[in-house]
Amino acid sequence: MTHALLVIDMQLDFCPGGALAVAGGDDIVAGVNAAMADVDAVILTQDWHPTGHSSFASSHPDTAPMQVIDMPYGPQVLWPDHCIQGAPGAAFHPALATDRADTIIRKGFRRAIDSYSAFFENDHATTTGLDGYLRARGIDRLTLAGLALDFCVAWSATDAAALGYATTVRTDLCRAIDADGSRDAALARMRDAGVTLA
């Protein structure tokens, strides 16, 4: 059992009608569910922010969503309040086959730092524990799907490749925010990191 599907943030706030909706975000759910049959393990990530998280524009006076500010760990996009712990928008899409998941990795729960990657917080040093979990299970091959392609999927994929996993992103099972060309930039960054785009 060496191949896992890593499903990134298939949550209601990232789907149409959500606080940080990705266009067509709910269109990929059936395909993600189908892909679960092709792997040995399924891992879900869940954005899980406390109220007043430092990545929220509402936490910074005189700022607006999508503005970029400097944080101690580097540049940070400010987001609308989203995926707040226990709130309806933080829940997985109801059609997602969550019962197929072996584990759920929650990220972004530290108030002072955001977390795009399934492996590290945005300081690229604080771990989520996913790498240790995968290695303990002998998993060395990852296929990624989910939301959003140009942020959490791309950061997760490039970190996975850097950690030595054979990494594939199913671009047909992702959707992007695509702010100011961020989709194409993320695709190029993943290619440069050795990620296979399928």
Image (tube, helix red, strand yellow):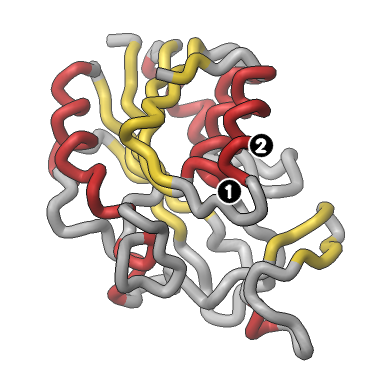
Disc 1 or disc 2, which is closer to the eye? 2
In the rendered view, would you say 66 is above or below 125?
Answer: below
x and y percentages locating residue 79 in the rendered image: 60, 70
Amino acid under disc 1: Tyr
Residue of label 2: 185
Amino acid under disc 2: Ala
Q: Is residue 58 visible?
A: yes
Residue at 39 percent of width and 50 percent of height:
9
In which quadrant of the rendered view does residue 89 lie? bottom left
Q: Is residue 135 visible?
A: no
Residue of label 1: 116
x and y percentages locating residue 116 in the rendered image: 58, 48
First of labels 1, 2 by sequence position: 1
* Callout 1–callout 2 Cβ contact below 8 Å: no
Residue at 32 percent of width and 53 percent of height:
25
x and y percentages locating residue 147 in the rendered image: 41, 47
x and y percentages locating residue 146 in the rendered image: 37, 42
In the rendered view, would you say 191 is above or below 43?
Answer: above
Circle 1 crowding by C-alpha within 10 Å: few under 14, some 14–19, many from 20: many
Split into 4 quadrants, where in the image is the N terminus?
top left
Quick one: which residue is furthest to the bottom in this view? 61
Closer to the camera in the image, 80 or 37: 80
- Position of 19 with respect to 97 (left or right) is right
Closer to the camera in the image, 123 or 198: 198
Q: Label 1 to label 2, Cα distance in Å?
A: 16 Å
Describe the element under mark 2 as helix, strand or loop.
helix
